[in-house]
Amino acid sequence: MLLFSALFMSALTSAAVQVIPKGYKDNTTSSAQDTQLSAVQLKAHFKKAVSEYRTELRAYWPDAEISSKTRLVFYSQDYQQKQAVDFKSNEIQISMPSIRQGKVLNYREMQKRLKKTLVQLLSTNLQDAVNKDPINKVMEGLAGIRYAQDLGSMGRDLILGELFRDERPSIKAVERMAKKLSKAAYIRYPAVASLNLAFAFNDRTTYIISLPEKRIRTKAIRYKSFVYDYAQKYSLPPSLVFAIIHAESHFNPLARSQAPAFGLMQIMPHTAGLDASHLIYKKQKVLSPSYLYNPKQNVQVGAAYFHILYYRYLKGITDSKARLYCAIAAYNAGTTSVMKTLTGRGSINKAVNSINRMSAPDVLRKLLRQMPTAETRGYLNKVLNLQKTYAKI
């Protein structure tokens, strides 16, 4: 694996958007000290927002599901309907109150409601989706964190815009797509063992709408221009950046983990975000979810952080392939975990000599077999395989 050797270090002219302290009114950029929110505070606010929202949801939905890395979940205002876009399974799931004629479903009326719901979902853009999430609203109230203001023009991108030929499809095009998808939808019936539980929380019907197989590739092509730009800027193969996006979020621009990490490449504001912002802006800044939900900005931060891992933190590893394997695993689990797995020592400086005595295949084998979590083991293998998929985009 050959990585581009040149590094373009030109500074950007625009300032990073940071966490804005509650009550801050001035439109000018304040100092980093004034605008930083600690990792402990961010996590505490996020935990509180999640807990409050899920408590509210449980009165209507026993699983109280919220949006995650690969699923965007929306509820109607009365909580009677649930919509989920599953980017990993490549499908839409819509649960709604059943409409019956006697004891049987009124399929005609259910189809009408399904189509109407799909039109609304397919018309939802990134900014609308961010603003609809109650967790984001609570976070803004607790910490003054901005969520949607910095999406810029990309905020008008539809969450499933890759289903359309035009990036800004007409309402007619949206309606045609909704009709097409609703016709192919099928009903997921609950298992017999769970019938009592299901009906205890109202009589609902869940429709499954499969999305086109080429959807993810089309999404990747939509992002190709800035992925290539930042891959070149930070001396990385574009296929690697694509592979990390796919492995982290399956191209869900509003991905959010429990960490919390945000966006396509799952950036944690106080770890990867701080390191990358220093490289990009020559100053460490706490990048807000609003900033990281912007797909273009997120890819820049993610690419910059991987550059730091490969070219700075792990530069002592002389074999380029061994260093790449370590960097991919470290992107997921951190450098300390990778060093401990390979040498028993958490310090990079103390571990490098031992790693350099290992062959690249041995490094890969040990990481795939002995990394502490199955998540990281699977992540490394997945990214390496996905690189082949995106080599020709």
Image (cartoon, helix red, strand yellow):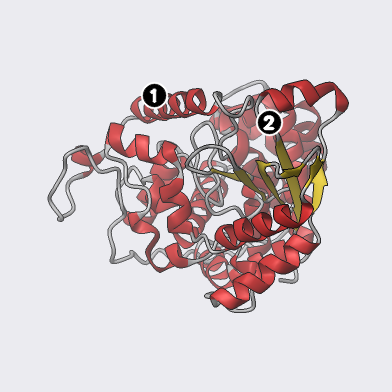
Cβ–Cβ below 8 Å for labels 2 and 1? no
Q: Is residue 390 above or below residue 58?
A: below
Secondary element type, mark 2: helix
Q: Is residue 89 visible?
A: no
- The residue depicted at 81 percent of the width and 37 percent of the height is 103
Quadrant of the image occupied by residue 62 = top right
In terms of depth relative to the viewer, which is nearer, 209 or 376? Answer: 209
In terms of depth relative to the viewer, which is nearer, 352 or 105? Answer: 105
**Which part of the image, by quadrant, shows the C terminus?**
bottom right
- The residue depicted at 51 percent of the width and 27 percent of the height is 54
Residue position for label 2: 354
Kind of residue at badge 2: Ser
Question: Which circle's residue, 2 or 1, is located before the other in the chain?
Answer: 1
Q: What's the CA distance linking mark 2 and mark 1? A: 39 Å
**Which part of the image, by quadrant, shows the N terminus?**
bottom right
In terms of depth relative to the viewer, which is nearer, 226 or 8? Answer: 226
Look at discs 2 and 1 and give the one toward the viewer: 1
- The residue depicted at 68 percent of the width and 51 percent of the height is 87
Secondary element type, mark 1: helix
How many marks on residues? Answer: 2
Q: Position of residue 228 (x, y in %)?
A: 57, 69
Q: Position of residue 91 (x, y in %)?
A: 73, 52
Quadrant of the image occupied by residue 122 = bottom right
Residue position for label 1: 44
Dot 1, how many residues are within 10 Å of its Cα: few (below 14), some (14-19), or many (20+)? few
Kind of residue at badge 1: Ala
- The residue depicted at 42 percent of the width and 44 percent of the height is 273
Q: Position of residue 290 (x, y in %)?
A: 38, 50
Q: Which residue is the extreme one toward the right? A: 192
Q: Which residue is the extreme one toward the front? A: 102
Q: Which residue is the extreme one toward the left? A: 26
